[in-house]
Image (spheres, rainbow, N blue to C red):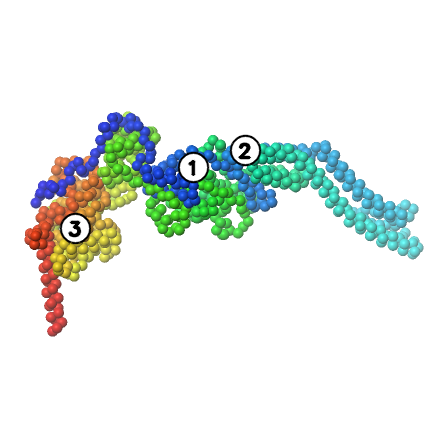
Amino acid sequence: MNSSAFSEFEVSTNELRKSCDLQAAGVETSADFPPEARRLGQQRAIDAIRFGLQIRDDGHNVFVLGPTGSNRHGLAEELAKERAASESPPGDWCYVNNFADPERPHNLHFPPGRGRQFRKDMLDLIEDLRAAIPAAFESDDYRAQLKTVEEKTQKEVEAHAKSLEDRAEIENIAVLQTATGYVLAPVRDGKVIDEKVFSKRPAAERKAVRESIERLSEELQTHIEQIPKLQKRHRARVKALNRKVIEHAVGVSLTELMEKYDTLPAVVAYLDEVRTNIIENADDFQASESAPLPFLRRDASQLFSQYEVNLVVSHDEEDAAPVIFEPNPNYTNIVGKIEHRAEMGALFTDFRMIRPGALLTANGGYLILDMHRILSRPFAWEALKQALFAKKVRIESPGEAYGFVSTTTLQPEPIPLDVKVILIGERWLYHLLAIYDSEFSDLFKVAADLDDDLERSGENVEAYASLIATRIREKKLLPFGLDAMQKIVEQRARRADDSERLSMHMGSLEDLLTQSDFWARQHDAQTVAASDVAKAIDEMARRLGRMRSRTLDAIRRDTLLINTDGSCVGQVNGLSVTDLGDYRFGHPVRITATTRIGSGRVVDIEREVELGGPIHSKGVMILAATLSSRYARELPLSLHANIVFEQSYGGVEGDSASVAELCALLSSLADVPIRQNFAVTGSTNQLGRVQVIGGVNEKIEGFFDLCKERGLDGSHGVIIPHDNVKHLMLREDVVEAVEQGQFNVFAVKGVDEALSILTGVEAGQRDDTGEFPEDSVNGRVEQQLIHYAGLRRTFAESSKGDEKE
C-alpha cells in the first residue's frame, strides 16, 4: 500500500499553517494601526489585581502569577499607578532626637510636604541659635549681670573672712594665707612673732595663745567649709543667669514655630522638649564659646546637631499615592537600616543616620516586589511578613532582629504601616508557598493569574496587531509593513504551540520586533518587511542551534542510526524534542522492540536502568495494558517484550512515544515490517486512542530536515495525533514540500490507523464473530499471542509431569 491509500488521514496544507490576513484592517504599515491598550487578553488577571488594590481589608495583598516575559511587572505597575492617581499622598515621616533616651529616637508624622518644611524650619532655627546664643553671652547686659553675681559672691566670701579676722585680731592672732592653705600665728605690736621669740614668752602667755589658736582653728575650719557652698551658690546663680539669657534668646523663635505647628500636638510637644533641653544645657553653649583653650572648646555643630530633623519619607501635596518597585529586595532595602560613622577607630551613630527601606517609601501606597528575589535574599521574606502582620516598620539590623548581636545600638520608634504589597512570581512558586508557608495565605489572599495565550479570533487578531504596532512605536522602531505584521502574528501563534491561540509572552515579542528592525536597517530599509522578520527568526535559531546541528551531523555520519528508507520488523522512528529554554528542536529517535514467549511482562529498558522518567514509565505500563485488553483476552498474556530507545544516553521523559513503542511491539509480534520512511509521535490510552502530545511542530520539522538532507521523494512523512492538527504552525518550507507532494503529514485517531500507515498492511477490525482478519496485523498479533499461550501451557504441563516422576 502506498501513501495515496491513506489520503483520508492526510493533513491538508491549509491546516499545516494557519496564515494571518490583515487586509481587512485597511492599513499599509504598523504606523497606521490605532493604539491598543497593553492589557489585551488579561481581563481576569486585571480584575483580580484591581480587586486586590481596592479592597482595604487586612491580608488582601496581591500575588501576580505568570512566567518571566509575560509583562507581569508592567501590568501590575500600570494598574497600581492608575489606582494611586486617584488617591491622596500619604504624610511625611521624620525621626528626631529623644532627649530623655537618645538610643530610642522618636518619629513625627506630618501632612504631605510639611515634614520637609519642618526640617527647613529647624535648620533655620539652628542657624538662628548659633548666632543668637553667642551674641547673648557676649552682650554688655549679660556681662553686667554676670559681674553683679561675681561681686555678690565675692562680698559673701570676704564677709566670712573679715568676721574671722576680726575675732582673731581681738585675741592677737593673725590669719595668714599660704600656698598650702590658712595658718594662725600670734601677733605682738601688730607684727607676727616667730617660733623662737614665742618660745621665750612666759608659759602662761604661751598657753593662752595656744588655746586661742585652737579655738580659732575650729572657726577657721568652719570658714573653709563654707567656701565650696559659696562656690556652689555662685555656680547656681550663674547657671540661672545663663538659663535666663538662653530662654530669652530662643524663646521668640521657638514660640513662633510652636504657633506654626499648633495643629500637630506631637510636634508642639517635641518643640517644647527642644526648649527645655536648650535651657537645661545652657552652660554647654556658654562653655563652648568661652573656653580659653581651643582643645577645650566643643564643636558648636555637635551641640546643635541634636536638634536637626531626619526626614525619612516626604511627599508633595500634589503627588499621588506612591508606587514603588524595589529591584533588589534585600533586608535593608525593604526594612531600612541604621548607618554608622567611624571616629578614632570606633563606630558611632545617631538618629540622623536612620535610613528608610521600601516599606516606608511605599507607605500609604503600593509596593511591588519580585518573589524569587525576595526568597533568595536572607531574612527578607520573614521581615516582610513580620512588618505586614505587625502593621508597623521597625528599623533594626538583622543581627539585632534575630538576637545575634548584643551591642547597644539605636532602637527607633516603629512607624505605622499601611501599604498594599504586590508580589510577582511564577505559578509554581505561588503554589509551593501556599502549601508550605502557613502564613502566606493569610497575607496574600488575591491571586492574579496571567493568561499565557489569547484566542485567535478575527477581532483579537486585529487588536493584537494594534498591540504590536503600539510596541513598535514605544520602542521607536521602523514601521513594519503589513506582510511583516502578518508574519509576526503567525509567529506568535507558533510561540503558543497552537494555530488557534496567540502567545501573550511580551518579552519574546519585543525581542522579535527589535531584531527584525535591526535586520531591516542593515540594508537601509524604510520599513520592516516579512523577509526581515524571517531573517530574525532564522538567525535566532542559528545562534541557538549548535546542539541541533550536532545531532543532525551525528545522524548524517551514522553515529546515531536513523533509517529513512526501507523497512524493518520491530523498529520505528519515534520523535523527540530537546528543550533548551529559549530554544527547542525536534529530531528522530530509533525505538525497537523484541518479543518472545514469557509470563506477560513488558520490560521498559529505560526504566530498568533508571533513565526513564515516571511519565514515560506510565506510558509503557498503559501500552502493556492496551496489549492485554485488545488481544486474546480469554488467555493469559504469555510474552516477554523488551522496548528501548536505541542510543539513548540521557534521560527519557514523557509518554509521546507510546504509540511508536506499541507499533514496534505489534510489528515484532506480527512479524510485519515497519516502513522507515515514516516517523510517528503520540501517546495512547488503554483503549488504543491516540492522544495529544507537545512540541508537534518541532517534531515534524526535525524529521523533515533529516529527510530533506537525504533527499525527499514523496514517500516520507510523519504521523501525528488527529487532535494535534489544531496546533500545527509549521515552517513555510515544510508546508511547501507537502503542497508539492514531497512530504506527508498524517493525522490519526487510533493506534490501528497509525499501524496501517506504518506497515502498509491493514490493521484489521474484529468481525461479527469477534475475530480479526487472518492476514491483518492485529490478526497476526493475536495468532502469535495464542501460540505463545499454547506453548506456555505445554511447558507448564510438561513441567508438572516431570515433577510427578
Whether residue 410 is visible here, answered yes or no, is yes
Q: Which residue is mark 1?
A: 323
The secondary structure type at the circle numbered 2 is helix
Query: In the figure, is residue 336 to the left or right of 749?
Result: right
Q: In the image, what residue type sits under mark 3?
A: Gly
**Which amino acid type is shown beneath numbered disc 1?**
Val
Q: Earlier in the sequence, mark 1 or mark 3?
A: 1
- Give the structural element (helix, strand or loop) at label 1: strand
The residue pinned by badge 3 equals 688
Name the residue nearer the viewer: 327 or 525.
327
- Give the secondary structure at mark 3: loop
Q: Label 2 belongs to which residue? A: 117
Q: Confirm or deny contact between disc 3 and disc 2 (CB under 8 A).
A: no
Residue lying furthest bottom = 805
Q: Quadrant of the C terminus?
A: bottom left
Q: Is residue 120 left or right of residue 614?
A: right
